[in-house]
Amino acid sequence: MDIAIVGAGAVGLAAALAFAADGWRVALFGKPTAPRDGRTVALLDASWRFLDGLGLLPALEEKAAPLAVMRLVDDTGSLFRQPPVEFMASELGLEAFGWNIENVELVGAMAAIVQANPAIRILPHFVSELEASDEAVTLTGDGFEPLRARLVVGADGRQSRVRAAAGIQARDWTYPQMALTAIMSHRREHRDSSTEFHTRSGPCTLVPLPGRRSSLVWLLEPGEAARVAELDDAAFAARVERQVHSLLGAMTVEGPRGKVPMSGLSVEHFGAGRMALIGEAAHVFPPIGAQGLNLGLRDVAALRRSLGGASDPGFEAVIAAYDKSRQTDVRLRTGAVDALNRTLLTDLLPADLLRGAGLLALSRMGPLRRLVMRQGLAGGLS
C-alpha cells in the first residue's frame, strides 16, 4: 500500500480523497462517522475551494450557509470596551468568507464519496500497533491482516497512536473552560452574519446555518457550563437568548446538545520516520476564528504538495518538506488563538487595554482590517 491514513474524521477523509485523486493507493482506517451534537464547522473560502476540487460541493451546498459578515462584540464589561467590529467579505471582493455546515453532515457527505472511490480501501478498525522500518510501516490490530504502507498519515486526534509511534513529542495544556454546542432556531433572520461575543469566560458565538438557524459555541467556566448544560431545552434557549442580548429574537433548541472540554496541543515536528501528522494529531486549540478544521485541511494540502513528483511517499525528503512547510503557519495561528483566549480570561487592565486598542484599530483602519481578513483566510490550499 502507498499511503495508510489512520483516522476517518473530516481531515482523514479529505486526505484519502486528495491522495487517491493524485494516483496513490490509499487505505483508510476508522469508522467515518460523527456524532450529532450541535457542532458545526465554518469552512473558509480556501477550504471550500479545496473541497470543491475533490468533488464535494454538490453534496454540501444545500446544507451550508454563507458567512458574509463576521462580527466581534466586546462583552467583557471592560473599562476599555470598544464598539463591535464587522468584517465584510465584500471588502475583499468575495461573496462569503466561507460556509458553515454541521459536522455530521460534512462527514456523512465525505464518507459517501470515499466509499464510492475504488482507489480507497476502507478498514473500519482500530490500529493498535505501528512498527516502522526503512522501507515501510506495518500496521496491526484486531479485525484485519497486518498492512504495510510506505507512508502512514496520522489523522487520529490528540491521543494519536501515529504520533507516539513516530516518537514525536507533544506539549498539551488545558483551559478553565467548557464549550457548550447546539443548533438554535430563531425568530429573526441572521442575514448570513456570524457574531462572536467576547466574554470573561471566552467567546460565545452564533454562526449561520440554512434558514433561521444558527450554531452555538459557548465557552464557560466548567462549573457554570455544567449548570447551564443541565437546563432543559426551553430554559437553555432562554439563557442563550439573554447571553446574546436577543440579537436573533426568541430561540429554540434543535436536536442534541454537546459539551466539550477546552484544551490545546502542539508538536515539535509534523512528521518523522515515514509518518506524518495532520489535523488534531498535530494541533489543538479553542474554537476561535474558525481555524481548527481549516488548519487541518491546510495540512492535507501541504502534504499533498510535498508528495508531488515523489516516487516514494514516505521518503525522508517528503517528510522533511512537509514538516518545514507547516512550522510557521501552525505555530502562528496556535499562538494567536491561545493569546486571544487568555486575554479574555483575565481582568488585568493591560490585557484589556491591548485587546481594546486592537479592536479599535480594526474598526477605524480599513487597510488593517482587510489585512487581518486576508490573513484569516490565507491558506495556500490551491
Image (cartoon, grey):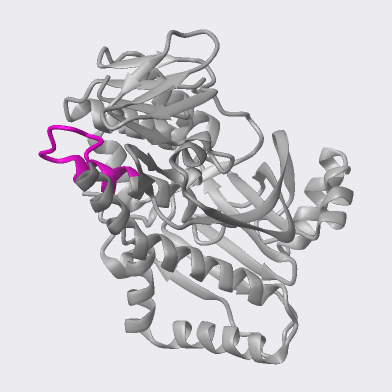
The reply, left or right, for residue 206 in relation to residue 151 is right
Residue 54 versus residue 168 in the image, above or below = above
Snapshot quadrant of residue 91: bottom left
Q: Quarter holding the N terminus?
A: top left
- Rendered location of residue 25, percent (x, y): 24, 20
* Range of magenta residues: 300-315
Taking the spot 22% from the left edge, 34% from the top edge, the residue there is: 313
Question: How many labels were placed on the picture?
Answer: 0
- Rendered location of residue 235, percent (x, y): 86, 46
The reply, left or right, for residue 240 in relation to residue 373 is right
Q: Which residue lies most toward the front here? A: 134
Snapshot quadrant of residue 120: top left
The reply, left or right, for residue 75 in relation to residue 300 is right
Residue 341 versus residue 96 in the image, above or below = below
Taking the spot 62% from the left edge, 29% from the top edge, the residue there is: 35
- Rendered location of residue 173, percent (x, y): 65, 59
Any magenta on residue 303? yes
Instruction: Please name whichever residue, 201 or 365, is drawn nearer the observer in this view of the structure.
Output: 201
Taking the spot 38% from the left edge, 74% from the top edge, the residue there is: 372
Instruction: Please name whichever residue, 116 or 241, is drawn nearer the observer in this view of the structure.
Output: 116
Q: Which residue lies most toward the left here? A: 309
